Image (cartoon, rainbow, N blue to C red):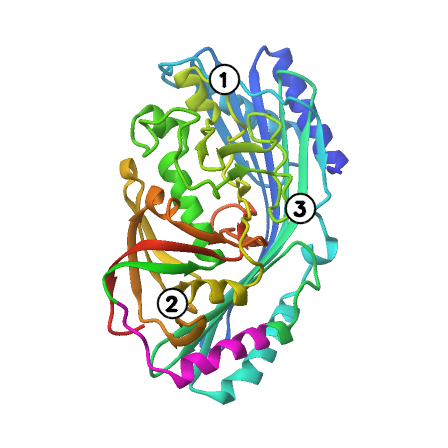
Amino acid sequence: MFEDRLRDLLISGRNQARKKGINAEFSFHREKSSLIRLGNSAVALSTHEELTRLDISVQQGRKVGSSSLTADITSSEQLQATLDQAAENCKAALGKDYEPIFGKVEETVDDSAGFDPELENFSPEAKTDLYAEVVKALKPKGKYDFSGSWSSGSTEMYYITTANDNEAYRRLTDSKFLMVLKEQNRKWELSVERTANKTGTFMADDVIAEFSSLLPIYEKNSGYKTKIGRQRVLFGPQAIAELLMLGIWGGFFGRFWEEKRAYTAKNKFGDKLFDASITITDDPTNPNVFGMPFDFSGKRRRPFVLVEKGLFKGLLYDSMAAAKYKKQPTGHDLSNTDFVLAPGNGPAGLEAGKKLAKNALYIPHLHYTHLPDPTKGMFTGSSRFNAMRLENGEFIAPLFSTRITDTSPSVFNNIVAVSSISVSQNESSTYSRRMPEAMSVPEYMLCDNVRITDVADSF
């Protein structure tokens, strides 16, 4: 439930705007963020922030102006000054070449289901202790150095407009853990990731066990340099999430489709885009995502289908793109989406996926990604952490740095198997304002004919 003092101030501000005949939107964001960074096997940074931001947007005809306050809201006078500044900025703005859509909260939302007070106040000391336990257990076993980051905290969001009396409020907690083990001589890297929305989700023993399962393959075998050309690849969760995001960015944003910059621009709804095993949704009801229930034009967010069994079904329109191209907004005036790649019919578990793949490259992470040509859905990215060579269904060697340059239509049309089990992949950024984001992806995806365009002689 939103704090009464702040709620009363913001509603009072909305009422004042109405009395003055001002069309105004009020977007409130408050975060408590705790971040630990690990470097050279020790804590290199420990920070804690509590930040409050208020963005007020005013619309008059085709003109829009805004003003922001980055401070605790303590008085109606302070709020009124921000509203007046937004109104002045609106007067001075150039008119848009389309009729903007003014925000309106479709229905009242009060969502605190994802909030855990213990995680909100999870201490830096507890994080440091877990890191220290892992370092103590593994560092004596080789010439290893450790780095990583661990972000946790809470986020509150509140949105109202002068269009009606409905209110949209959300409060949640989240945590993203990353730890990287780097061998100092051969320079290979292993990583372990964890995501959580409550405390006690994982322990140091879990992290130690995962590193320990990977270390023998890297320590006992030379690096494998693969060949340039098309190959079978078994992708892991982080790589799948990256492929999913690249595929969506290149093909499913309404603005890019309208401007013929998307690889789907020549397609119409109902056309076959991908293999029938591929279904993609933006689904805030999925348990693996953080579930943003509304966007910041007031639209109630519900499951939205982009691809259904390989068929083109939808495009994402924020209110600006919708207004410009005379479409209906789809609930995407926000930066933290809830994308889901549906599970398939493949056997559950990575071991089963390995047996199915037989001889392949295992690439669980993709880094340094880019979209060189969105009109073709062309992307590029390199392997990094935990990549290995599979032979007869077993990991036999670590994989030297390997670059994939291919297209989303090619990769998603060359599906061999998709795991029947989904996992949560945390994609939250530690930069800018706190906006928790996670995707639901299968634990593995096996593809043929993936285009390898560059291989290195080292990790």
Q: Which label's residue is closer to the chain start, 3 or 2?
A: 3
The three-letter code of the residue at mark 1 reads: Ile
- Using the rendered image of the protein, determine whether residue 178 is visible from the camera's viewpoint: no
Q: Which label's residue is closer to the chain start, 1 or 2?
A: 1
Q: Which residue is mark 1?
A: 101
Q: Which residue is mark 3?
A: 172
Mark 1–mark 3 CB contact (< 8 Å): no
Q: Is residue 420 magenta?
A: no
Residue 153 drawn at (x, y percent): 63, 54
Name the residue: 55% across, 31% down: 304
Query: Where does the magenta region start and end?
Result: 207-226
User: Magenta residues: mostly which secondary structure?
Assistant: helix
The quarter of the picture where the N terminus appears is: top right
Number of the label disc, if any, that sits on residue 359: 2
Residue 55 drawn at (x, y percent): 54, 32
Q: Nearer the viewer, residue 201 or 241?
A: 241
Mark 3 or 2: in front is: 2
Q: CA distance from mark 1 to mark 3?
A: 28 Å
Crowding at mark 3 (Cα within 10 Å: few <14, some 14-19, many 20+)? many
Crowding at mark 2 (Cα within 10 Å: few <14, some 14-19, many 20+)? some
Q: Is residue 225 magenta?
A: yes
Image-based side of 96 in relation to 66, left or right = left
The three-letter code of the residue at mark 2 reads: Asn
